[in-house]
Image (spheres, grey):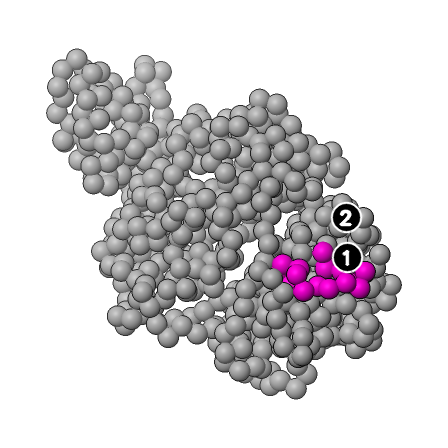
């Protein structure tokens, strides 16, 4: 059997092993195929230093594609770099510019080092995983490999190869022998076996191959149907790399776990801006017992307690089975999950008690009209309730606020500004941005129907790929656009953005409950921009305010108060005062108390802080 190598090139996180090729290694092992995984990202960071690596991977805006540009001249040595350098000079500080240029000088030596450090000469099939800013590093090394060892087989796969992107990459780079498009757990082992045996690859699903100088798709991509049959990711090579490199001492590793693929909400109502699932929205999840067993196995195998779920959305069934199992059996792990935002208090409490220490819910907005335009299936007041619940139950929270949706109104953002004033004691978003047009999103697929016109790739792609406009459009994942009605969201979102800035800067202001010894309740308000106040509530007022810890309709509040008082109670003035002082949020006929109950923030014994997921910070 031919020797196989899978490479994880810059620029991706140092703290997380590559889950896709780690699953592939385990799948190949099931087929009796030897495989190694090497971490080019770790090697590059070792050579240039962690801070320099972090500048590209973590701090520079991803629309700049600086990581791609650093390697592009080793693919296209004659391309004009002056325009891109002018862009860098416009957006970077002198110190950042100096770092970027120093990294530029390191690339050639790094590519040469890969031949020695990874013993590339000893492998027959060399595959690259590519997502976001891994195209040029992968393609640059693949070119050198093919120049020196023409008989070696080079393969490209990963998120950048989905659909037309993979076909165009294969067409433009003749030193890439094959591209695996879509899920590759079945197709890549089939390809390796076919090459080893010298048999046909014509029926390998999702495989892009070359015939008569044309790039062709052998068969439609396959997908994994039974997630329980997936092997555990084999992260041995990642930890071996950390142990062998000096930078390994600086890296706090966090394990990735995949418990589901696709999006159960998107299959019903695809959020208009989301392109994450490509052409595979169909939701498939591992059973609770399988996820629990995998967590235990991986914890024991690698000695790591922190896990980040790579699922686009957590299975709703896990509230019924997996989370109670984790809570009851306490395996000593912590989790970070992406999740839908319409959670009830008991669900948030269960997440915490099960060891989920952080979540990335699809909040995206605090305005119900804008959320409806997104097709989120949640309301603004529900999102605010989740912000408060996460604060109360001690869950780390990562979320973004997006604007610029066709059909939104200036009034939507006046209302959002008022909500921000009221909730500035809760977790602010990590990023606030105008929507980007991503391939595979409804906004992209049906742009004109959504009021978006002149769709074109980000202009920065032109500085990476010296191809025709159509070819660049085929490779691109991020797109710019204009509005059919000529709107400019900046004209109406600026007041909201200024309030958002103050919210993000708030470190001390708060709105909390203080329960008195006599059974009373006082609301302590020290939110910024207002005079600190204490609001003592009477016995019945306390009961009503606590009752509205969950979203309540006006009629249910009146019925509750009447039951407590034994008579009909006039609540108009009280509720108006609560709303006026922004102690309670009203949306239509629904009410929600905003003061935080700090007594809920106890932590289960097994909980360990899990590093916040970067996903919410990477939208800009």
Q: Position of residue 221 (x, y in %)?
A: 59, 58
Whether residue 334 sits left or right of residue 30 in the image: it is left
Magenta stretch: includes residue 206: yes
Q: Residue furthest right?
A: 122
Whether residue 397 sits left or right of residue 417 in the image: it is right
Q: Residue at x 65, y 40 (%)?
A: 229
- The local secondary structure at tag 1 comes to helix
Tell me the number on the disc at residue 193.
1
Q: Vertically, is 579 above or below 63? A: above
**Residue 159, visible in the rendered structure:** no
**Residue 166, visible in the rendered structure:** yes
Q: Position of residue 435 (x, y in %)?
A: 40, 61
Q: State which tag comes first along the sequence, 2 or 1.
A: 2
Q: Residue at x 27, y 21 (%)?
A: 543
Look at the image and tell me in which quarter the N terminus lies: bottom right
Circles 2 and 1, Cβ within 8 Å, touching? The answer is yes
Q: Position of residue 178 (x, y in %)?
A: 69, 67
Cα separation, mark 2 vs mark 1, equals: 9 Å
Q: Nearer the viewer, residue 189 or 204?
A: 204
Whether residue 509 sits left or right of residue 610 in the image: it is left
- The local secondary structure at tag 2 comes to loop
Q: Vertically, is 483 above or below 317? A: below
Q: Position of residue 152 (x, y in %)?
A: 80, 69
Q: Which residues are magenta?
A: 190-207
Whether residue 362 sits left or right of residue 493 in the image: it is right
Q: Tell me the residue that label 2 is attached to.
A: 31
Q: Nearer the viewer, residue 502 or 28?
A: 28
Q: Residue at x 36, y 25 (%)?
A: 514
Circle 2 crowding by C-alpha within 10 Å: few under 14, some 14–19, many from 20: few
Q: Specify the quadrant of the image occupied by residue 531.
A: top left
């Amino acid at each position: 059997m031919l020797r196989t190598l899978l490479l994880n090139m810059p620029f991706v996180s140092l703290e997380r092993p590559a889950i896709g090729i780690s699953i592939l290694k385990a799948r190949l092992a099931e087929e009796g195929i030897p495989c190694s995984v090497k971490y080019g990202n770790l090697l590059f960071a070792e050579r240039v230093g962690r801070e320099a690596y972090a500048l590209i991977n973590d701090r520079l805006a991803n629309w700049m594609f600086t990581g791609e540009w650093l390697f592009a001249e080793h693919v296209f040595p004659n391309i004009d770099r002056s325009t891109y350098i002018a862009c860098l000079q416009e957006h970077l500080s002198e110190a950042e510019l100096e770092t970027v240029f120093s990294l530029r000088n390191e690339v050639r030596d790094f590519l040469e080092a890969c031949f020695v450090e990874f013993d590339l000469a000893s492998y027959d099939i060399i595959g690259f995983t590519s997502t976001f800013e891994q195209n040029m590093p992968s393609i640059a090394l693949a070119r050198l490999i093919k120049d020196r060892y023409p008989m070696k087989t080079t393969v490209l796969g990963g998120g950048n190869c989905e659909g037309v992107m993979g076909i165009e990459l294969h067409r433009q780079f003749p030193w890439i022998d094959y591209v695996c498009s879509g899920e590759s757990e079945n197709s890549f082992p089939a390809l390796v076996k076919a090459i080893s045996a010298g048999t046909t690859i014509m029926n390998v699903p999702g495989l892009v191959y070359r015939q008569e100088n044309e790039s062709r798709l052998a068969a439609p991509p396959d997908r994994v149907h039974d997630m329980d049959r997936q092997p555990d990711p084999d992260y041995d090579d990642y930890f071996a790399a950390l142990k062998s490199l000096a930078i390994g001492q600086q890296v706090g590793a966090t394990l990735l776990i995949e418990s589901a693929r696709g999006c159960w909400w998107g299959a019903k109502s695809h959020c208009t801006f989301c392109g994450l699932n490509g052409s595979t929205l169909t939701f498939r999840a591992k059973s609770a017992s399988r996820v629990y067993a995998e967590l235990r196995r991986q914890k024991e195998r690698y000695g790591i307690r922190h896990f980040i779920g790579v699922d686009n959305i957590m299975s709703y069934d896990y509230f019924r089975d997996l989370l109670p199992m984790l809570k009851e059996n306490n395996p000593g792990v912590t989790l970070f999950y992406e999740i839908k935002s319409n959670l009830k208090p008991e669900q948030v409490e269960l997440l915490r008690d099960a060891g989920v220490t952080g979540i990335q819910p699809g909040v995206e907005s605090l305005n119900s009209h804008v959320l409806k335009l997104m097709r989120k299936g949640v309301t603004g007041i529900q999102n605010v309730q989740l912000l408060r619940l996460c604060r109360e139950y001690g869950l780390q929270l990562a979320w973004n606020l997006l604007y610029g949706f066709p059909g939104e109104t200036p009034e939507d953002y006046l209302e959002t500004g008022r909500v921000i004033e009221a909730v500035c004691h809760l977790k602010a978003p990590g990023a606030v941005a105008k929507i980007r047009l991503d391939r595979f999103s409804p906004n992209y697929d049906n742009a004109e129907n959504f009021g978006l016109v002149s769709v074109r790739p980000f202009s920065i792609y032109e500085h990476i790929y010296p191809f025709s406009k159509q070819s660049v459009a085929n490779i691109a994942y991020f797109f710019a656009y204009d509005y059919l009605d000529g709107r400019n969201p900046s004209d109406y979102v600026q007041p909201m953005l200024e309030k958002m800035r103050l919210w993000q800067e708030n470190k001390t202001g708060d709105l909390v409950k203080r329960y008195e010894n006599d059974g009373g309740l006082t609301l302590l308000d020290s939110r910024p921009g207002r005079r600190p106040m204490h609001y003592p509530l009477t016995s019945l007022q306390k009961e009503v305010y606590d009752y509205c810890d969950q979203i309540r309709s006006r009629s249910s509040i009146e019925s509750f108060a009447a039951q407590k008082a034994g008579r009909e109670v006039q609540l108009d003035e009280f509720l108006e005062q609560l709303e006026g002082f922004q102690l309670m949020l009203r949306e239509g006929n629904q009410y929600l108390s905003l003061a935080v109950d700090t007594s809920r923030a106890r932590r289960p014994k097994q909980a360990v802080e899990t590093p916040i997921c970067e996903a919410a910070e990477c939208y800009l």
